[in-house]
Amino acid sequence: MTVERTLSGKTLFITGASRGIGKAIALRAARDGANVIIAAKTTTEHAKLPGTIDTAAAEIEAAGGKAFAVKTDIRFEEQVEAAITAGAEKFGGIDILVNNASAISLTGTLDTSMKIYDRMYDINARGSYLATQKALPFLLEADNPHVLNLSPPLNLNPKWFAGHAAYTLAKYAMSIWVLGMSAEFAEKGVAFNALWPCTAIATAAVRNLLGGEKVVAASRKPEIIADSAWAILTRDSRACTGNFFTDEEVLAEEGQTDLEQYAVQPGTPLFKDFFLD
């Protein structure tokens, strides 16, 4: 008998879920009837950063899920702990953690202020570690628990450090957590995996920081990451852990190789993502 793969009834805690990739993952889960705890900072819409935790919650509910929006700055332990505790109380536990929130500054050594440096490490490295640590007591009690970090394969080619070493190391920290924690919790059945896009993804970060509309046109939609995440999160946590997946790899494993539907402008040559040689 084939068991249906679904996130129905599962509770996901997603950092940075008010927009972009985080919201796309939330909406895909919502279509199954999942519960989503939205942990993000935005409560007032910004001209260049559309979406708030409340608008995301409304979209999740409209898609068929249940939403719980908690204003959370993952740089602060008490806020993360409070959000996870409140979300677990509302939905009766937490099954899945998605560490999506991230900060980026593609600046060299002389141009990276310590304020920017600290922001990247506080959000990328420390924030993902903190959210995982606080969610683990609930994940250890869950059926088929998963942690998914939106982080790249660990590629030590110097070209990925030369222009933005601070960002690279802050982002790689999220991947190191996957490497270490997948081994640490293997016997407990908690899956730890990383997921990274092969191409640029049309998000506010790409539009505002990484090349504007020209790069957006050469990007794929966030839904490719959402569908890839769904495929990972519906797999057996004991059999699928410690992987550094790309979106194309995951979808190919699911039998999907025609990815044109995800292109912002089909037929346009795609902008390749960082950290992939």
Image (cartoon, grey):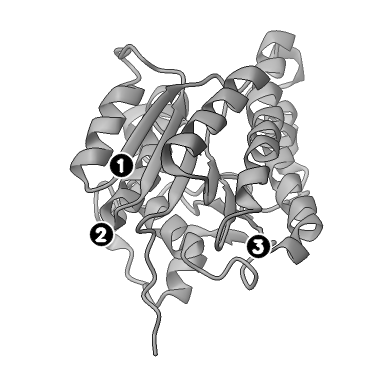
* Distance in Å between CA atoms under marks 1 and 3: 29 Å
Residue ID for mark 3 = 243
Residue drawn at x 39%, y 59% is: 7
Q: Residue shown at 70%/38% (left/top)?
A: 133
Residue labelled with disc 1: 66
Label 1 crowd (10 A; few <14 / some 14-19 / many >=20)? many
Q: Which type of secondary structure does the marked residue at label 2 adopt?
A: helix
Along the viewing direction, whichever of 133 and 264 lies nearer the viewer = 133
User: Which comes before the other along the chain, label 1 or label 2?
Assistant: 1
Identify the amino acid type marked 1: Lys
- Residue 152 lies, with reference to residue 81, above or below; the image says below
Give the quadrant of the N terminus: bottom left
Question: Looking at the picture, which amino acid does disc 2 mark?
Answer: Gln
Circle 3 residues within 10 Å: few <14, some 14–19, many ≥20: some
The mark found on residue 261 in the picture is 2
Residue in the foreground of this view, choosing between 161 and 222: 222
Image side of residue 21 versus residue 190, left or right: left
State the SS at label 3. Answer: loop
Q: Is residue 237 left or right of residue 257?
A: right
Percent x, y for residue 194? 61, 53
Tally of numbered tags: 3
Q: Residue at x 32, y 12 (%)?
A: 46
